[in-house]
Image (cartoon, rainbow, N blue to C red):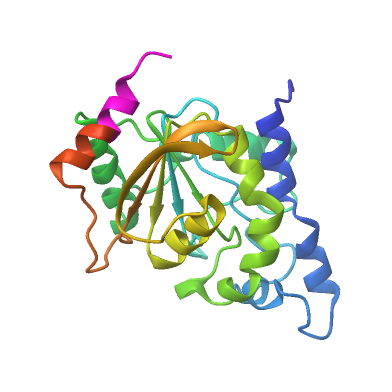
Amino acid sequence: MCMTDSDALLLEVARCTNIQRCFESTVLQHPCSKVVAAQGVSRDEFHLPEPWSGEIETAPILFVSWNPSWNPNERFPTREWTDGAIVDFFRTRFSHSDQRSQTWREIGGIAEHLLGRPARPGVDYCVTDAVRCKSLDGAGARKALRECSGRYLRRTLRVSGARVIVALGKDARETIATYCGVRAQIGADGPMMIAGRDRMLVQLGAPGSSQRRRLPNEELAQVQAVLTANT
């Protein structure tokens, strides 16, 4: 297997050493303990943290959500999977995951709104999270945020080739806005330097929320100009 820098980071996230620490601890002192325990399964059954879904090095849009939801019935990587199978699963996630969920459908719709054309999941956009461990209704995510984003957010943004970063929902907006040194408010900002590249930052409401998930025409035109510019 030819390993790229992004593949190496993907595997580091998926095999995060904090998971084993949390399973071995009898006291819930680790900041990730609650989000790890939220799945309520054994170590062997535990769904690995989600690094990202899609081709992160080339997708022009990177969505950053809060944390992934857990579905016990999903065929999903566990620690017994090989490195090659894990990398392939996340790179090709949209080809074998149920995209009928509200979250996937809305993210696809937002991508089409920003691009001004039909969007190809995993190719035109990639999806990651501020907190990578899966849980229902964000259980334990806030406590794990500093540890998880401190380890992986900057490095994920650095391997991303996205021209536009889209933060979805209040928690993700606050996390990305703090990183970028801007206000956490719905709308488009930039271009600005984000993890070594000039990019637009778009902040929108979370899928399914009552907050705005579309940009006004003037801001949309700015984003589309960045997405269609020659490199």
Secondary structure mainly formed by the magenta segment = helix
Residue 227 lies in the magenta-colored region: yes
In front of the other: 54 or 48? 54
Quarter in which the N terminus is drawn: top right
Residue 160 lies in the magenta-colored region: no
Q: Residue furthest bottom?
A: 27
Instruction: Write the residue at 73% across / 20% down.
Output: 2
Q: Position of residue 35 (x, y in %)?
A: 62, 73
In the image, residue 36 above or below residue 133: below
In the image, residue 24 above or below residue 98: below
Please state the total of marks drawn on the protein image: 0
Instruction: Write the residue at 52% across / 36% down.
Output: 193
Q: Residue furthest top?
A: 230
Q: Position of residue 85 (x, y in %)?
A: 66, 36
Instruction: Write the residue at 49% across / 25% down.
Output: 58
Drawn side of residue 47 relative to residue 217, left or right: right
Q: Position of residue 195 (x, y in %)?
A: 59, 38
Drawn side of residue 118 relative to residue 83, left or right: left
In the image, residue 208 above or below residue 167: below
Quarter in which the C terminus is drawn: top left
In front of the other: 228 or 137? 228
Q: Position of residue 15 (x, y in %)?
A: 74, 51
| Residue 9 position by quadrant | top right
In front of the other: 73 or 176? 176
Drawn side of residue 37 relative to residue 112, left or right: right
Instruction: Write the residue at 57% across / 74% down.
Output: 142
Magenta stretch bounds = 223-231
